[in-house]
Amino acid sequence: MALSVIRRGVLSMRGLQGSFLVAPTSLFRPQAATIVSKALRSKDYSRPIPYPYKTDRYGYIQSLLDKTTHRFDDNTKIIVVDGPIAAGKTDFAKEIADELDMMYMPEANLDMCYINSYGYDLRQLDDLLPERMRSYDLKDFLQNPTHPNANSFQFEMFTLRMSQYIDALAHVLNTGQGVVMDRSVYSDFVFVEAMTKFGYMTKAAREYYYECKKMGVPELMRPHLVIYLDMPVEVVQQRIQERNYPHEANSPLYTTEFLSYMDQIYKQQYLKEISVHAELLIYDWSEKGDPEVVIEDIERLEFKCEKHKPKLADWLLPDETSWCTKRMLYTLKKAWIMQWINVPTTSVPELLASADEMKKFNDVWNNAPGMKYAKGFNADAGDQFIALKIRADP
């Protein structure tokens, strides 16, 4: 019987047609060694016109006409805000992004997978699917972490975080604007380790996870800065109770033992590993500190890329051609990178679906509103003038 690794979501190769923006080239400029807030920027500063990478193709021909580094400024960087559950990362990251004139990217979640571009929630189709193929998101995991789908849930989260981080890189390289992210693909393994330790993920699935990770994550450029908002476990539990989300407050997952182990993995593995490659700021956020103080600390950092040293080495590219090549990779070939992490396997049954299950899943999802054709061509989702589009876009 044929088996398939469960992968939800819609990831497609960008079309080859499209116009491109011709921007002036410039002498190669390495990244600036600072970050500045809006308050310290010159009033005359104006960011160069961004390349419309979401609608226009950026390939080899475009790279000859539109170089990359002329859009860079002090804040052309990626900042990741991380920390325990309920630490206040979302509000903090939004405020930091606003003060630094960067784009905020929210934490990846399965709504990105289950809600299509027309706003249709595919979870409505669960009754038509086999039990194995039904939706299973964070709320389901927190209420029932021992469910067989917990393994595939974590893989879906990894896939979404990977996809989102590539989007962040594409945004930075095409616009010059920095990005502030709520968590990233680099701390995803913390959840894998905790889930495996407490029996919510199998050891075979864990081994397969790291095999997939090593195929794609090394192609990415690590963040410039990680900000870790630290809190003792008892404060984390208190915050969870205070915000009183029904799926969290009564969850069997958030025990002292589970949260303590996550805290241990964060500090003994993730923070040690990421600090080799990125700047790191750690704050005790038990009392929710002042973001303005953090901004001041960020402005004091020196983001120096030095040869033969690992810190920020991902961003030490030798010439303009190298920057354009990276930009093409993240903008045009995202689907390639995402395919690299889809490593074939037949040895992890908890992640596999039978051919019959996959056929039923595809039959249901591919005929849902907005899922049958490319965006703009789905009459059942309200698209109009389809015939005119076909004539205009042969």
Image (spheres, grey):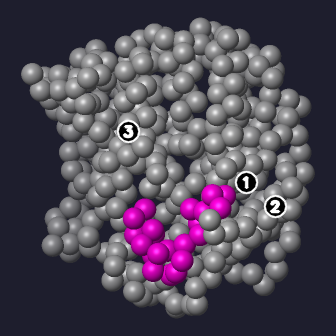
Residue 85 makes an appearance in the image: no
Mark 3: which amino acid?
Cys
Task: Residue 239: give x, y in percent of width and height.
Answer: 77, 22
Q: Quadrant of the C terminus?
A: bottom left
Question: Is residue 328 on the magenta stretch?
Answer: yes
The image shows residue 199 at horizontal and vertical percentages of 49, 11
Q: Is residue 56 left or right of residue 200?
A: left
- Residue at x 82%, y 80% (from the top left corner): 42
Mark closest to the chain's N terminus, 2 or 1: 1
Task: Report x, y in % for residue 166.
Answer: 47, 55
Pointer 2 residue: 301
Q: Decide: marks 2, 1 in contact (CB < 8 A)?
A: yes
Q: Is residue 183 above or below residue 192?
A: below
Q: Is residue 245 magenta?
A: no
Q: Which residues are magenta?
A: 309-330
In this rendering, is residue 61 above or below 143?
A: below
Residue 158 numbered mark, or none:
none
* CA neighbours of label 1 inside 10 A, class few (<14), some (14 to 19), many (20+): many
Please give the label number shown on residue 212: 3
Earlier in the chain: of badge 2 and badge 3, it is 3
